[in-house]
Amino acid sequence: MKTRALLLMTAVILMSCEILIVDPVFDERDRITGTYRVEEFSQTYNEYGTFNIQIRKSFNNYNEVIVENFYNANIDVRAEVVDGTIYISRQLVNGYEVDGVGTVYYDEIRFTYRVRDTYYNKPTDFCEATAWEY
């Protein structure tokens, strides 16, 4: 009888214990938000350019960011961040059709993208760019 009472008491004590496991919340976008200096090379026009972009979190989607002043055209492009890669899906923004990808390396982002100006029907511009955070 004492053994049963002891087992019952032990079971009640163990069931009343609450174990709380807290997983750290990591937002991959935090790693890339900020202001960047961009050096861009246009393969189409064989020209170099430098300008600034701002990357900020979007509140529409948990892994979406907004790249402001993309292509130095004062356009805001939506991108998705997955495992250190920034995916810019095809989109039309203020007359520019854009798509591309960016890869995050330590303190820089390397972009490869294409831009087509639909207003002036210029040739599609294929670009490579490197961005360094300020």
Image (cartoon, helix red, strand yellow):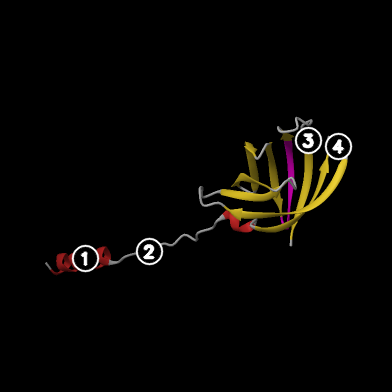
Q: Identify the secondary structure beneath mark 2.
A: loop
Residue 13, by quadrant, is bottom left
| Residue 114 drawn at (x, y percent) | 73, 36
Indicate the amino acid at tag 3. Asp
Residue at which label 1 appears: 12
CA–CA distance in space, label 2 to label 3 = 53 Å
Relative height, residue 40 to residue 5 (above, below):
above
| Residue 6 drawn at (x, y percent) | 19, 69
Which numbered disc covers residue 125?
3
Q: Nearer the viewer, residue 117 or 64?
A: 117
| Residue 51 drawn at (x, y percent) | 78, 53
Task: Looking at the image, tell me whether mark 4 or mark 3 is earlier in sequence order.
Answer: 4
Residue at which label 4 appears: 45
Residue at which label 2 appears: 20
Task: Give the residues in magenta.
Answer: 106-115
Residue 44, by quadrant, is top right
